[in-house]
Image (tube, rainbow, N blue to C red):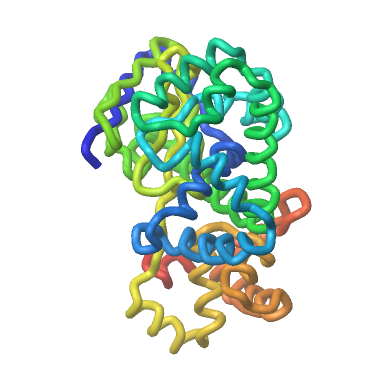
Amino acid sequence: MAGTLRIHLSDADFRHVQFARSPDPIWESILGLHVLSAPPGQLPARLRHWRGRARGRLPHEDLHRTCRLLNDLAPAAAYWPDFLTPVESEEGMSAGLRALRETPRARLARELREASRHRTLPAWTRRLAVGDRALLDDVANALRHFHSRLLMPDWSETEATVAADLARRMEALEGGIGAVFSSFTPFVWHDPVLSAPYPVDRVIRPRGRGLRLIPSFFCHTAPVAIADPGLPPVVVYPLHSYDPPAQRDVALARLLGPNRARVLEALTTTRTTGAVAARLTLPPSSVSGHLTVLRDAGLITSERAGPHVLHRLTPRGRHLLGR
């Protein structure tokens, strides 16, 4: 990373720091789009697996036009228009897309003009910049289509991964908000500044408005921040990657058997039975049997959360994995 993101937090900001409790569907859609075009070697294992599955769906789902339209507006670059990630999406995809469709013409023109300073935009964006509502509907529909066809098949894994990250933050909160900030990767906390590697040098001063922090399954390497300083401060941050060393893989396979070891390793992030089965391409019935054995051995716990049963490592299980 060539620059640094620095977030200067005042005493008033500390009272308004928010941690998102669930993944943001629009942010995840745009960041998932970036994962599709990223070199696999630059991705953590969880995203390499997802990328392989998603690219396998592309020929069957008529998604090429959707990806091309979204990539024209929001490529993996230092800037894309903020109107694509409205704050209302914290209430869900429908609320976010409704806000996107209502973006004022002046804002469309301003943010697309800013985007044109960073790269050459396709000719069709000129119509969008003057408020073409049909085109804005196309953008909203493209985001919904991308999310429903490429993200929703694995959404339970995304939700479980984010839930596990939130649980780690809440555990750190016992030491105060500074301890929470110190628990982030790749952030560094030096009171009162939270900093992280970033594509360019960037300073955010919330000035009493607080800060909303959103964990993202698809964000990797560096956080992403809303560009317009006049908008509510939002920073999306990458989840820590837990890829076990190859030698430990071999040792665990000898101890537990290869498939049961894989199931245990998959639970370095909280997951449902279906998410584990999809990640490992094992039959759900087989995964369920392995989970029962691991639970009886005290290596994992299972608890219901709404329609899902979430499985997570116990301290004993984390110790076995060297976590």
Q: Give residue 312's quadrant in the image.
A: bottom right
Towards the viewer: 318 or 284: 284
How many marks on residues?
Answer: 0
Residue 22 in the image, given as x and y percentages of width and height: 61, 40
Residue placed furthest toward the front: 123
Residue 190 in the image, given as x and y percentages of width and height: 24, 29
Above-or-below relation of 319 to 110? below
Q: Give residue 87's quadrant in the image.
A: top right
| Horizontal side, residue 88 vs residue 246: left or right | right
| Horizontal side, residue 147 vs residue 204: left or right | right
| Residue drawn at 63 percent across, 39 percent down | 143
Residue 302 in the image, given as x and y percentages of width and height: 66, 62
| Horizontal side, residue 265 vs residue 179: left or right | right
Residue placed furthest toward the right: 307
Towards the viewer: 68 or 200: 68
| Residue drawn at 63 percent across, 30 percent down | 89
Q: Quadrant of the N terminus?
A: top left
Residue 221 in the image, given as x and y percentages of width and height: 35, 48
Towards the viewer: 302 or 278: 278
Above-or-below relation of 301 to 297? above
Say if residue 315 shows up in the picture: no
Above-or-below relation of 9 to 235? above
| Residue drawn at 49 percent across, 68 percent down | 317
| Residue drawn at 53 percent across, 14 percent down | 107
Q: Quadrant of the C terminus?
A: bottom left
Say if residue 154 shows up in the picture: yes
